[in-house]
Image: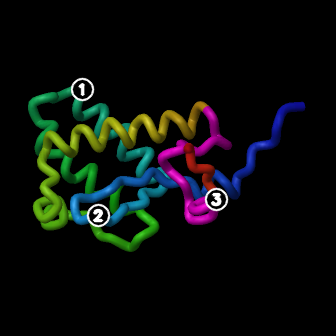
Amino acid sequence: MGTPIDLAQMTRVTKDFALEDGSVLHVRKPSQRIMHEILVFEASFKADPENVSDTIGEFIDLTFSYNTDGVVIDEEWRERNSVDPTVCLALYSIYAEFVQELVNVPNSESPQSPTKATRGKQKTSS
């Protein structure tokens, strides 16, 4: 038998993004609804790549509003934080990698993404 998958640990995983103001946004792993939206977004991007700048902001609003900090991400927030369509595409790519990590190794956490439960317990390199 292999190592059991710790479902409690999976629910606490976040991907952390440092913002220009020095704060950190802790984005949760996607819910089933957000996973569906990811698939819809990818399909619409493949069907009409020219339209990506119109929909990428909405995608970031949806996925990044699912955070542990209670921050609502919307167009105003993106403008205040200088998150233009190019930055949104980069954030989407990073978020997609985060989701892929969760799918590939469900009990691992990215060393860049400590949860509240593990924050402060990480080893620091000397």
Characterize the local packing of mark 3: few (<14), some (14-19) or many (20 or more) Cα atoms within 10 angstroms: few
Mark toward the start of the polypeptide (1 vs 3): 1
Which x, y percent locates residue 119? 57, 61
Q: Which residues are magenta?
A: 105-121
123 in relation to 75, above or below: above
Mark toward the start of the polypeptide (2 vs 1): 2
Quadrant position of the N terminus in the picture: top right
Q: Main secondary structure of the magenta part?
A: loop
In this orientation, which residue lies closer to the viewer: 24 or 10?
24
Identified at 46% across, 40% down, the residue is 98
Q: Which amino acid does the dot numbered 2 rest on?
A: Gly
Identified at 44% across, 45% down, the residue is 35
Residue that badge 1 annotates: 46
Report whether 15 appears left or right of 120. left
Q: Which amino acid does the dot numbered 1 rest on?
A: Lys
123 in relation to 19, above or below: above
Quadrant position of the C terminus in the picture: top right
Q: Please report contact status of discs 1 and 3: CB closer than 8 Å, yes or no.
A: no
Badge 3 marks a residue whose secondary structure is loop
Residue furthest right as drawn: 1
Residue that badge 2 annotates: 22
Badge 2 marks a residue whose secondary structure is loop
